[in-house]
Image (cartoon, rainbow, N blue to C red):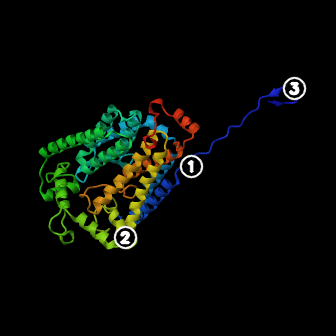
Amino acid sequence: MINDGGGTAAPKVEAKVKRPLPKADKYIMAIYIAILVISVIELYSASSREVQASNVFGPIIRHGQMLLLGVVLTLGISRLHYRWLIPLTPLFVAVTVILAVYVLFKGDIINGARRSTTLLGIPIQPAELLKLAVVLLIALVMSKMQERRGVKTSGVVISASFVLLCSGLLFTQGLTNTLLLMGISFAMMLIGGLQMKKFLLVLVAYGVVGGAAILVKKSNEQHYSEAELLHITETGKNFAGEVVTLERSGTQRGRIDRWLGDSIPKYAEPITAENRQEQYSYMAQAHGGWIGQLPGNSRETARLPLAFSDYIFAIVVEDWGFLGGMFLLALYLMLLARAGAIASRCAQPFPALLVMGMAVMIVLQALFHMAIVTGVFPVSGQPLPLISKGGSSIIATSIAFGVMLSVSRFAVQSNNRKEINAEIMALPPDIVGENLGKL
């Protein structure tokens, strides 16, 4: 109490002290910035097919605008406590599934399949957003369905059913996204402590449903000549002028057959319409050698189809060589390692699953891209996270980085009981548990 000189005491007013915002993980932030720098350099280097004399900087300006939007998303999400993702996850999942259903029937045709729609002038590919939805839903469900020796059966059924639903929505677009969704779910289930018996049952369920879908698709497959296939891919219409989408199974089988290989070495194969992407990609990587030709000296970017998106890693290797490619690979792997270190220290399962799920999503997609470009996997379209041109991929990856930074900033990573209790009070009671990584 403070005396005001007139014999009365006035209550003491205590000024509210604003707590400083906790710091985000500097290693994840450094990896994010490094990938952004590489993205700007390599996208411009790989965009010679899009450069016009009237606007030389057009491709890099458009890409820069998407990266800037991504940076705003990343920094904004990183400053929000990860607990806000709990009520937002059902809404995000519902909107993403609705978008995917719409695209399945009414989407824009790209390379012979319905893949995207336009929202506020930005092309949106639900495939990229569905990966985020899978991570968010599995993290939420498995946090709520924890039991002492693993995960409740109901949690496994919900998670696996959602993955199968998303896979079905993407099945007409090719197998890569379907395999990615299943790979992400497998990793998160193992991280979440799923019992091996239940894991094997999920594996069998995926195999049975996937096999049945392939048989149905094969029985309904339409056959086109090589010339008509090329025409449909480029125009979205058959020779009769009808808008059609391709049944991709024939294309996929052809790619797998080429990947399994003939007796002819790759360098001795003639370049055809079917293998030109692969051949020019291999030439670009061979031209890069150990240390590369440096950006601006690529000779393959002008003739490699989709050099700025599905094959940008080939241009990275041509520009910076084998060592540069390995450096980029190391960046993604360091992201996974750092996420694992943060997850292992989290006191609660939800933030631990979030940070690991987002890292697995980014890194697994990067590994798929690199494996396809280098010939380890059959040819398929998959962007390199944050580096390939593409609005949806940049937005999804930026959100993932923002979530990882939020977890690193706000999740308790110590044994301080006071801090742990405060985190427990901030979370819904049904999601509070013990991080299995700390058991």
| Nearest to viewer (mark 3 / mark 1) | 1
Mark 1 lies on residue: 23
| Front residue of 163 and 308 | 163
Q: Are marks 3 and 2 in contact (CB under 8 Å)?
A: no
Q: Name which residue type carries label 1.
A: Lys
Instruction: Determine the CA span between mark 2 and mark 1.
Output: 36 Å
The residue at 71%/37% (across/down) is: 15
Q: Residue at x 74, y 33 (%)?
A: 13
Q: Residues within 10 Å of mark 3 (few under 14, many from 20)?
A: few
- Element carrying mark 2: helix
Question: CA–CA distance between discs 3 and 2?
Answer: 83 Å
Q: Residues within 10 Å of mark 1 (few under 14, many from 20)?
A: few
What's the amino acid at mark 3?
Answer: Gly
Q: Position of residue 418 (x, y in %)?
A: 58, 37
Horizontal side of 180 relative to 386 (left or right) equals: left
Between label 3 and label 2, give the one nearer the viewer: 2
Residue 199 screen position, x and y as percent: 29, 40
> What residue sits right under mark 3 in the picture?
7
Residue type at numbered disc 2 = Gly
Q: Residue at x 37, y 53 (%)?
A: 363
Left-right relation of 113 to 65: left
Q: Position of residue 314 (x, y in %)?
A: 32, 65
The residue closer to the viewer here, 201 or 14, is 201
Mark 2 closeness class: few <14, some 14–19, many ≥20 residues within 10 Å: many
- Seen from this angle, which residue lies furthest right? 6
Q: Earlier in the sequence, mark 3 or mark 1?
A: 3
| 3D distance between C-alphas at marks 3 and 1 | 48 Å
Q: Which residue bears the numbered disc 2?
A: 321
